[in-house]
Image (spheres, coloured by chain):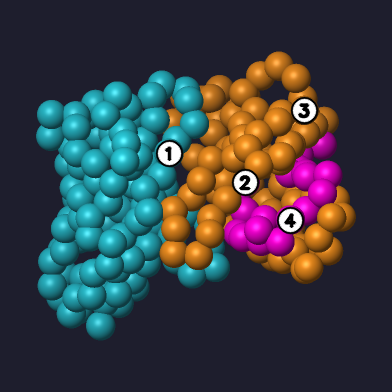
Chain colours: A orange, B cyan
């Protein structure tokens, strides 16, 4: 079975400071990992993905994430937070090793960036 | 707009009524997914189509739920005899092969 954990319900950071949103996963095969962002009353927007290759993945809006196989983590990071980054962030995994096609999502982390 | 389109955006229905939602995926995407999201939770997988074939169904998809994707284009999700516990945001997503999935804005269902 595939699963994702986002241990923090909310992350607060001051504008201009670096931010990290944590994600750990569990799969039996090879993980495909994704980050999505959700603004109020909107669908999910794709930010970035890890399929294979470099462990550091760069995505939209200056976000990046680091894949760590030994720690089974895929934390989302940004060097300098903006107030407009305030939103709900979801980590998701797909276990390609067992042929799963659907994503399993974490419970989400609300990012609050203070001016 | 060439994104994933869902209709309606909002639906209020009385308990026991049937409802149907529609999803139009991105045109070249062969895979289509339905998810359900309740307040404070991440989306939960319901069902998956590759072209017109429904290849996977979650245990969350009770007998009251049915989904179709005729001709491998748009999809419909029907809920029969709605219950208050069905109140949620229903999200549709599509992708091609192993690429990332793109989501629609969802249909918010309220059962009163």
In x, y percent, where is residue A99?
Answer: 47, 24
Instruction: Give the label, 1 or 2, closer to the camera.
Output: 1
Dot 1 falls on a residue whose secondary structure is strand
Residue that carries the numbered disc 3 in the rendered image: A56
Residue that carries the numbered disc 4 in the rendered image: A82
Give above or below for A18 relative to A11.
Answer: above
Q: Which quarter of the image is occupied by the C terminus of chain A?
A: bottom right
Instruction: Give the label, 3 or 2, closer to the camera.
Output: 3
**Is residue B56 or residue B48 the one in the foreground?**
B48
Chain identifier of the residue bearing label 3 in the image: A
Dot 3 falls on a residue whose secondary structure is strand
* Span highlighted in magenta in the image: A71-91
Give above or below for A89 relative to B71.
Answer: below
Given the current orientation, which residue lies at the most extreme top position? A53
Can marks 4 and 2 be said to lie on one chain? Answer: yes
Residue B112 counted in the magenta span: no
Residue that carries the numbered disc 2 in the rendered image: A91
For the question of whether residue B96 can be seen, the reply is yes
Instruction: Give the label, 4 or 3, closer to the camera.
Output: 4
Chain identifier of the residue bearing label 1 in the image: B
Q: Which quarter of the image is occupied by the N terminus of chain A?
A: top right
Q: Give the residue drawn at x 74%, y 37%.
A: A65
Give above or below for A33 relative to B85.
Answer: above
Q: Give the residue drawn at x 62%, y 60%.
A: A87
Chain identifier of the residue bearing label 2 in the image: A
Number of disc labels = 4
Given the current orientation, which residue lies at the most extreme bottom position? B112
Residue that carries the numbered disc 1 in the rendered image: B102
For the question of whether residue B32 can be seen, the reply is no
Chain identifier of the residue bearing label 4 in the image: A
């Amino acid at each position: 079975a595939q699963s994702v954990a986002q241990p923090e319900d909310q992350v607060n950071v001051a504008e201009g400071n670096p931010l990290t949103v944590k994600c750990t996963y569990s799969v039996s095969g090879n993980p495909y990992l994704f980050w999505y962002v959700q603004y109020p009353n909107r669908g999910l927007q794709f930010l970035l993905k890890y399929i294979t290759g470099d462990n550091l993945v760069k995505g939209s809006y200056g976000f990046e994430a680091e894949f760590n196989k030994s720690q089974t983590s895929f934390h989302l990071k940004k060097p300098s937070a903006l107030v407009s980054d305030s939103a709900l962030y979801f980590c998701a995994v797909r276990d390609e090793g067992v042929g799963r096609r659907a994503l399993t999502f974490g419970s989400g982390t609300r990012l609050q960036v203070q001016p | 707009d060439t994104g994933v389109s869902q209709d309606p955006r909002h639906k209020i229905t009385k308990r026991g009524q049937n409802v149907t939602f529609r999803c139009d995926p991105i045109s070249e995407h062969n895979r289509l997914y339905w998810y359900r999201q309740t307040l404070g939770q991440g989306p939960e997988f319901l069902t998956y189509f590759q072209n017109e074939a429904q290849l996977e169904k979650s245990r969350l998809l009770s007998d009251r739920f049915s989904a179709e994707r005729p001709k491998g284009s748009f999809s419909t999700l029907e809920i029969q005899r709605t219950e208050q516990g069905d109140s949620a945001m229903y999200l549709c997503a599509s992708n091609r092969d192993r690429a990332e999935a793109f989501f629609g804005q969802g249909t918010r269902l309220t059962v009163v």
